[in-house]
Image: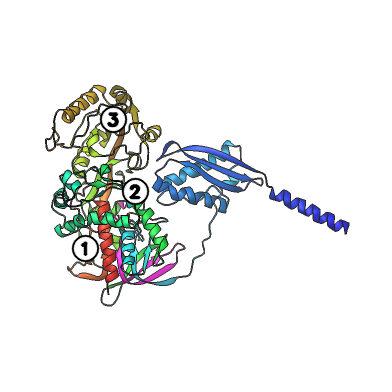
Amino acid sequence: MKKILAFILALAMMMTAGLAVAETSYTATVDSQIGGVDAVTVTVTLNDDGSIKSVVVDECKDTPSIAELPCKKLPEDMVALNTINVDTISGATMTSEAIKAAAKKALEDGGVDVAPLMVKKEVVVERAADETLEADVVVIGAGGAGLAAAISAEQNGAKVIVVEKMPKVGGNTILAGGAVNAVEDRSEFAIKQNDSVYWHYTQTLSGGDYQGDPELVMTLVENAYDGIQWTKELGMEWLGEEAVFTVSGGLWPRAWKPAMVAGTGFFDTYTKYIDKTDKIDLMLNTKAEKILVDDMGAACGIIATGETGNTITINAKSVVVATGGFSKNVELRMAYDAIWGTLDETVLSTNHEGATGDGVKMLQALQADFVQMGNIQLLPLGDPKTGSLSGNIEHGVDSRIFVNKSGLRYGDEGGRRDDMTRDLFAQEDALMWIVMDSDTYPTGDELNNFGETANQLVAAGRAVKADTLDELAVLMNVDAANLKATIAEYNEYCTGGAKEGQADQFGRTLFGAPIDNGPFYAGARVPTVHHTMGGVRIDTLCRVYNENGEIIENLYAAGEVTGGIHGTNRLGGNALTDTVVFGRIAGESAALQK
Ligand code: ADP
């Protein structure tokens, strides 16, 4: 008996000792391509047997909307698979690499032999069974237009399934600056701004060289303000009139700003709504491959590939295509480009990885009609390393200028996006600096349009800051005399009475306060492929046409996959308007389909 008791006691002691496993934590910080110097800090905790107990991303300065998923998923995978060498998240490769590098460095700095924890584990994913699902409406793509369509369809009584090929929602919309052009016609504010729905209409049409379909443009501008109200009803928060501004290439101060950074506010709102209703199923990591049609040629569902490679058939009364554009598909953009000459891989893009034009291919298979596919929009505002819009110090058009590598202004910074990009291509190395003063960043801790502070961008080497223009010129490596003369001349337009409508030598008419309030800021930018304005032809109900000019029954499209709204050149601030307005219409049309 004694022996048994002693044995049990010993066992209990062993087990307790086993439970109180010693563990050690290691922390390291690395640079990242997006967040710059010291951007990502990770702490890895090991059990005393050397296995990974936990991984925590303590800090990540990469763009929040991109960083969120890898910061959560990679640590989980590292613990589950007991290796640092986990798969990167598609669409967030650079952030993923930085997290892995920080975890590795933490262990190496701590003297841990990392080799056993760097073994690539073969993840055996069991292929789930093929399945067939039923819905009233199936939506392809969970970007801005797709989720607006899904919610609007649900509000009109439909049971909806949304498929999204990426591991997260948001598409390009979440990366956008967030601004939405909209005018409340005849409101006090619109009158004060000298603005009207008709002026928005005229500028959208003329800004696209009258290639936009007038009816679609009218639908866009007439429903824009109501679209914002609709998002408010869903719970989205917006800044007030005082925050309304002119987006680059927006031509008029009519861009409303969400309270949350970039496009994140839309998805915070949309996903909360979707979580609450049981009538919308959102399937991530699910790629639509084909739109199904019945004997009469009417759309009746889709075939998709699920996360495990299984085939998912979704039968539905109607299909909404909201797959976005093809800016990340070099082959397609080279084939269609009618504006730029070459859009090969040396030209970067602002877009997320999923912008590969899948919708174009699926719709081509149905002989859908496409319009103005050659109209591809570039912006002069890309990060020189990644092409991304984030990292940009600018806020509104009125407060900043562009100078080339010689420190000289070279064009109208308040003009159309295509003109500004053409001007930039003509400069040395197609590189320019955006220059502004502390009016925009009184302390430097204020946020840009992408949730980054000016000081963070400076620390990351993505912008420079100096008390005087002479010092700024040194940091920019441009001629100081040129820079000072160029700014002095520009300031005369701001203070010397260049009033609205009175242009400078480049045709610029939008002048804010002069650039004279140090410290000064500058950030380098290059041309970047941004938006494919051509796409499938739709009518004002978002119904899709075929090549014979007939409607393809039960098929709807919205957002960047569609063409004929923006013409040759989309106004800054009109893309998100497009997703809300036409997404809503597509959802309603699809739900009301008999
Ligand atoms: P829009 O502004 O028109 O809404 P976005 O780029 O915001 O365009 O969203 C389009 C979404 O569609 C992206 O999230 C993208 O990953 C998704 N998508 C593209 N192709 C497919 C596909 N074949 N299957 C499922 N989702 C897709």
User: x%, y% of residue 349?
Assistant: 31, 46
Kindly identify the amino acid type of the residue bearing the numbered disc 2.
Leu
Viewer-closest of 562 and 275: 275
The residue wearing badge 3 is 437
Distance from disc 1 to disc 3, alpha carbons, whole Å, reads 44 Å
The residue wearing badge 2 is 175
Q: What element carries label 1?
A: loop
Q: Does the magenta stretch include residue 397?
A: no
Residue ID at (48%, 50%):
72
Q: Write down which quadrant ligand 1 falls in.
A: bottom left
Q: Give the range drawn in magenta.
A: 300-329
Q: Is residue 45 visible?
A: yes
Residue ID at (25%, 37%):
430
The residue wearing badge 1 is 538
Of marks 1 and 3, the one in the foreground? 3
Residue ID at (36%, 50%):
264
Mark earlier in primary sequence (2, 3): 2
Kindly identify the amino acid type of the residue bearing the numbered disc 1.
Ile
Q: Residue at the far front: name it.
A: 188
User: x%, y% of residue 155?
Assistant: 32, 66
Q: Does the magenta stretch include residue 301?
A: yes
Q: Residues within 10 Å of mark 1 (few under 14, many from 20)?
A: many
Establish if 549 lies above or below 493: below
Distance from disc 2 to disc 3, alpha carbons, whole Å, reads 25 Å
Residue ID at (53%, 52%):
77
- In the image, taking residue 66 as reference, residue 242 lies left or right, namely left
- In the image, taking residue 138 as reference, residue 509 lies left or right, namely left
Q: Quadrant of the C terminus?
A: bottom left
Q: Is mark 2 on a helix, strand or loop?
A: helix
Mark earlier in primary sequence (2, 1): 2
Mark earlier in primary sequence (1, 3): 3
